Image (spheres, helix red, strand yellow):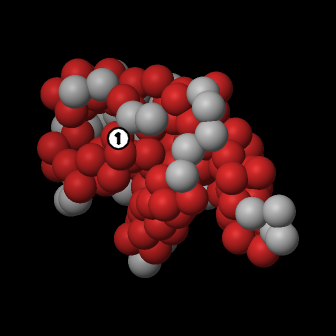
Amino acid sequence: MKEENQKSIEEALDEINSALNDPKGIIFHQRRLAFLISLGSVALLENYLEKNSVLKPGSKINHQWLKKKKENVKKLISKQLTSEIDSLSDIDNILETIYQIENERNQIAYGKPVSELKLNEKINLFLDLKKSLEK
């Protein structure tokens, strides 16, 4: 696992913990959560691809790719891989989860306040992704 990716995941987890334990509430952390959950999701995906020995050395996944249609995402990611993307088990589920995180990222990061329910949903998606990819 790249040290950079590990730090990104830890930073996302730290912000999640800060938000959940802050007496001001989770909405106070909205923008940081949006950015760091997005960053952490990409780091988790890159780690998964590295763990499966398919990510080309020096390759990076762009978070903006992950909010596109699944077929287009697969084409973009495939250019960064040494083997077929569909050979990876669970790639469709992984990409669907990350899509749910990325889909509203900019709205949450740059828009008006969203509900605690929405932020908790994004946190849970990230934590579920982390759990499934790190087992």
Badge 1 density bin: few <14, some 14–19, many ≥20, Cα 10 Å: many
From the top left corner, tell me how far across and down residue 72 is, in percent: 23, 22
Q: What residue occupies the far right of the structure in this picture? A: 23
Please say whether residue 81 is visible from this viewpoint.
Answer: yes
From the top left corner, tell me how far across and down residue 11 is, in percent: 76, 56
From the top left corner, tell me how far across and down residue 6 is, in percent: 69, 57
Residue shown at 70%/40% (left/top)? 31
Picture layout, residue 22 above or below residue 98: below
Picture layout, residue 89 above or below residue 67: below
Picture layout, residue 9 above or below residue 99: below
Quadrant occupied by the C terminus: bottom left
In this rendering, would 18 be left or right of 46?
right
Please say whether residue 8 is visible from this viewpoint.
Answer: no
- State the residue position of label 1: 99
Label 1 amino acid?
A: Tyr
In this rendering, would 133 be left or right of 57?
left
Mark 1 falls on what kind of element? helix
